[in-house]
Image (cartoon, rainbow, N blue to C red):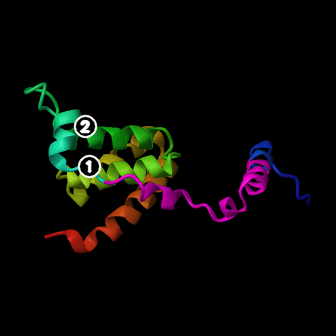
Amino acid sequence: MSDAKTPFELMIAQAQEMAKAFNPAMESFSPKGFEALWPTMPKDVMEMWFGNAVNKDGLDAKTRLLLTLAGLTMQGAQADTAVRQTVRHALEAGARKQEIVEAIGQMSMFAGIPAMTRALELAREVLDDNEGDEA
């Protein structure tokens, strides 16, 4: 067997080397640490921007966020940060754990089991972190 890498693996390795050359501190960079810079929006703000505050008969923020989560799952749950942030915001908008799991699970019929499993893994990270917050 050879140790040949795919073009994608070579590109990532090259990007990591370049980042280290520009700034040695980038060697330990974690995208999850970057997520902490973006606070969770309060429910009222989400309703104003993404909910039915302007369109009274439209979707509320919780429903929009569950749809966004389904869409991210359909894309193969490749955007880790986006999935985790959407779950976090959906919780803030009033979504229950069961609703989040069902929104992701429903996509298994369309996106496939691997995409659903990946999205559930990412959602579980957020849900586990927020477990003590439930009343």
Find residue 14 and report its horizontal and vertical position in percent. 79, 49
Image x and y of residue 68, in percent: 34, 39
The residue singled out by tag 2 in the image is 64
Q: Position of residue 47 (x, y in %)?
A: 17, 39
Look at the numbered disc 2 and give the secondary structure of its residue. Answer: helix
**Helix, strand or loop for the magenta stretch, by majority:** helix
Tell me the amino acid under the disc marked 1: Met
Amino acid residing under circle 2: Arg
Query: Which residue is more in the foreground, 30 or 26?
Result: 26
Q: Which mark is residue 41?
A: 1
Q: Is residue 59 left or right of residue 20?
A: left
Q: Looking at the image, which residue is at 49% across and 54% down?
A: 118
Question: Which marked residue is nearer to the observer: mark 2 or mark 1?
Answer: 1
29 versus 79 height, above or below: below
Q: Is 60 rendered above or below residue 26? A: above
Q: How crowded is mark 2: few (under 14 residues within 10 Å), some or many (20 or more)?
A: some
Report the span colored magenta: 12-39
Which label sits on residue 102? none
Mark 2 touching mark 1, by CB under 8 A? no
